[in-house]
Amino acid sequence: MKLNDNTRIKKVVLKVSNLKTMVDFYSNVMGLEVYNETENHASLGVDENVILELEYDTKYEVSSTPKTGLYHIAFLVPDEKYLGQFIYHLHDKNYPLQGAGDHIFSQALYFSDPEGNGIEFYADRPKSEWVIHEDGSIESGTYEVDVQHLFEVMVREPYTKMPSGSRIGHVHLQVNDIEAARQFYINTLGYDLKTEMFSALFISKNGYHHDFGINAWAGNKIRQLNDTDTGLKTVVIETTQVQELVETFSNQSDYQTLVNENSIKITDKAGIELEFTML
């Protein structure tokens, strides 16, 4: 099958070892609103839309060994004017910024949450400024960010919450077999390849630069994430094609699946779980 352009990432579910610390970070540092919080679960988001869920269990532990799973969650804000504002915000919070990159189609800030999950906070440039080739691929790179420009155009007020219109722009995954990822995400699900470089694939629907980044930069010997690891639990994707996915995967044994009334969970060869739910 081939997923159509009515396909988009809805939210990410993370397993956490300290729910209070993680809720505090994602609300007070990232600026997400807390919609629901219990002793083992929290839902956070923007504009009344849940885009992040945190799930706590005593068995979850932060591992120091490289594993498949999450490379980073990328939060997309509507305009570059919020990037300089957020840099000042991190400084005020005494929270370390780990890097920044100009990728031609976007400008991004990089850091990690308290349990080591990578985070990208970014703004797209207008699509008219993207370098799109005749085959639909999109020029990418990593260049120095003009931070002075970001400070010149930034919002001149304290950052208190993630701006309206923000969402999860993409999710970057870490795998141990890039060709297995190509087979699943491109050949089986039908995501479009937009950029390929250095053992990494950047794929999307609807012409976006990437809904998923997938890399094998840590090599093919890293272990597969397991049930007790903190980090990524599920990427939830909205689509109009849940039934087609059920039909496609019902008679195969290559991937673990779980079918519910209005969704299907599919686990890729790296142990990463995707849940496709009705748009």
Image (cartoon, rainbow, N blue to C red):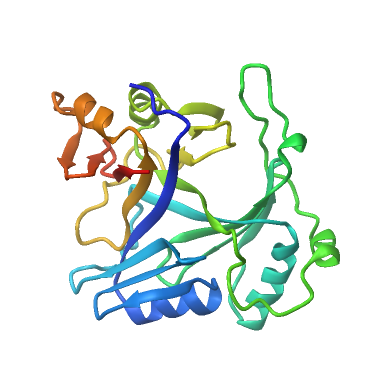
User: Measuring 37% from the left and 38% from the top, which residue is drawn there?
Assistant: 239
For the N terminus, the image quarter is: top left
User: Measuring 32% from the left and 45% from the top, which residue is drawn there?
Assistant: 222
Give the side of residue 152 with respect to residue 277, left or right: right
For the C terminus, the image quarter is: top left
Give the side of residue 146 with respect to residue 12, left or right: right
Between 222 and 118, which is closer to the camera in this rendering? 118
User: Measuring 39% from the left and 31% from the top, which residue is drawn there?
Assistant: 178
User: How far from the left and from the top, in percent, is residue 7?
Assistant: 43, 37
Q: Is residue 64 above or below residue 139?
A: below
User: Measuring 74% from the left and 66% from the top, which residue is drawn there?
Assistant: 84
Q: Is residue 58 above or below residue 262?
A: below
User: How far from the left and from the top, in percent, is residue 195?
Assistant: 57, 30
Q: Is residue 277 above or below residue 160?
A: above
**Residue 96 sits in quarter:** bottom right
User: How far from the left and from the top, in percent, is residue 268?
Assistant: 27, 37
Q: Is residue 114 above or below residue 66?
A: below
* Image label count: 0
User: How far from the left and from the top, in percent, is residue 173?
Assistant: 42, 45
